[in-house]
Amino acid sequence: MTAAAIVAAGVSARRLIRPPATPPTPTRAPGETSYRPRFLLARGLARGGDAARLADGLRLLQNLRADYPHALEIEEELALGYIERADFPAAEELLHQIEARYRHTTAETPARLGALWKKRAAAVAPADRVALRRALDCYRRAEAIRGDHFPAINVASLQYLLGERAAAVEQAERVLGLLDAADPPPDGFWPHATRGKPSCSPAATRPKPCRATGGRSPTGVAPRGTARVCGGSSN
């Protein structure tokens, strides 16, 4: 048997034993080799700021999850979309599935759970302290995975809302230290907004001016989230 015949026989055998491919969703092109282009489109829609774009983004993310069932970032973004839509049961179910399936996750999974419990806490007045405590636990887990300013400032904010003023001040100072030590300095709106949050605690030291804006918010408005923290009850 010639070498060409041997190769052909091997190819035919592999075709026979290969399981049939899962039919792609209608939006998946036959030659698609990566989910990233569709994922970026879906993420942009889901974070577009209005209900119609969010609904379109969620549909795309659900299709992507069907096509790529083991892509963690797709599921994390889908969970965030559910939270934004206030579909808390769907978000919680998905996030718990992620934690059960993956031995190691990124910081996004516990951070999404933290956001979920924060929104649940804020849905009632006064804020649900049990939900605040669960949010704090989730953000602490996220901080343990990725020790940067985003989960860390949420830990400080939740400590403040729970009345743990001394711990909140200490954590806020640590966040400012993280921002100061970053090399290169973090750019964009949220690092500047993060600097605004520790000042909500009356015992906290004054945040240092933002390097990139001469101490001003880059948008000229108060950082989003500051009022929410300042208005939190410590009872």
Image (spheres, rainbow, N blue to C red):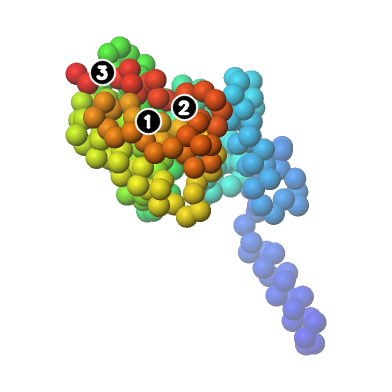
Q: CA distance from mark 3 to mark 2?
A: 20 Å
Examine the rendering and report whether any part of residue 19 can be seen. Answer: yes
Is residue 213 or residue 98 the one in the foreground? 213
Q: Quadrant of residue 65?
A: top right
- Against 128, residue 102 (above or below) is below
Kindly indicate whether the residue at mark 1 contacts the one at mark 2 (C-beta within 8 angstroms). Answer: yes
Mark 2: secondary structure: loop
Q: How far is mark 3 from mark 1, CA to CA?
A: 15 Å
Callout 3: helix, strand or loop? loop
Q: Quadrant of the C terminus?
A: top left
Task: Give x and y (percent) for residue 75.
Answer: 51, 41
User: In the rendered image, which residue does mark 3 sit on?
Assistant: 233
Q: Nearer the viewer, mark 3 or mark 1?
A: 1
Q: Residues within 10 Å of mark 2 (few under 14, many from 20)?
A: some
Label 1: how many residues lie within 10 Å, few (<14), some (14-19) or many (20+)? many
Question: Which residue has dot 2 on it?
Answer: 223
What residue is drawn where x is 43% and y is 37%? 209
User: Which disc is residue 197 wearing?
Assistant: 1
> Total of numbered circles in the picture?
3
Query: Residue flagged by tag 3: what amino acid is it?
Result: Ser
Camera-nearest residue between 183 and 98 = 183
Q: Tell me the element at label 1.
A: helix
- Image vertical order of residue 194 relative to residue 7, above or below: above
Identified at 67% across, 42% down, the residue is 38
Residue 55 in the image: x percent, y percent?
A: 61, 24
Question: The disc labelled 2 sits on which kind of residue?
Answer: Pro
Residue 227 bears which disc, if any? Answer: none
Q: Quadrant of the N terminus?
A: bottom right
